Image: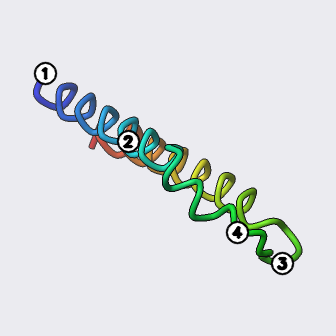
Amino acid sequence: MANRTLRAQRLVAVFMLGCLLFSYPLLALFDSGGEVFGIPLLFAYLFGAWALLIVAMILIVEYSNR
């Protein structure tokens, strides 16, 4: 039971991190018009943050059972 509670708390923390990463003030920092490998900086940030959140959720769900 404690393991499920800890996993739920970690997933809520990832959700809150996602809310922070996709909030306007942080997105405005990356809307500068620069490019990374030919991709606009804002799009690179969005997809990178999205991938980071997915990896964090996978790690929490998979390794919380051990």
Labelled pair 4, 3 in contact (Cβ < 8 Å): no
> Which residue is labeled 3 in the image?
37
Front: mark 3 or 1: 3
* Gap between marks 1 and 2 measured at Cα: 20 Å
Kindly identify which residue carries mark 1. Answer: 1
Q: Name the amino acid type tagged 1.
A: Met
Task: Specify which label sits upstream in the sequence, 1 or 4.
Answer: 1
Q: Which residue is mark 2?
A: 14
Task: Answer whether labels 2 and 4 touch (C-beta < 8 Å).
Answer: no
**Mark 3 and mark 1: span between their CA atoms?**
46 Å
Question: Dot 3: few (<14), some (14–19), or many (≥20) neighbours within 10 Å?
Answer: few
Whole-percent x and y of residue 6?
A: 18, 34
The answer to which of marks 1 and 2 sits earlier in the sequence is: 1
Q: Earlier in the sequence, mark 3 or mark 1?
A: 1
What residue is pinned by disc 4? Answer: 32
| Amino acid at dot 2 | Val
Q: Nearer the viewer, residue 44 or 60?
A: 44
Give the mark, 4 or 3, whose residue is nearer the N terminus: 4
Q: Are marks 2 and 3 in contact (CB under 8 Å)?
A: no
- Front residue of 45/65: it is 45
User: Percent from the top left, x then y, of residue 47?
Assistant: 69, 53
Residue at 77%, 75% in the rendered image: 34
State left or right for residue 66 relative to residue 42: left
For marks 2 and 4, the one nearer the N-term is 2
Residue 32 lies, in percent from the top left, at 70, 68
Amino acid found under the numbered disc labelled 3: Phe
Q: CA distance from mark 2 to mark 4?
A: 26 Å
Eye-nearest disc, 1 or 2: 2
- Distance CA(mark 1)–CA(mark 4): 47 Å
Name the residue rendered at 55%, 44% in the picture: 54
Circle 4: residue type: Ser
Left or right of 2, for residue 58: right
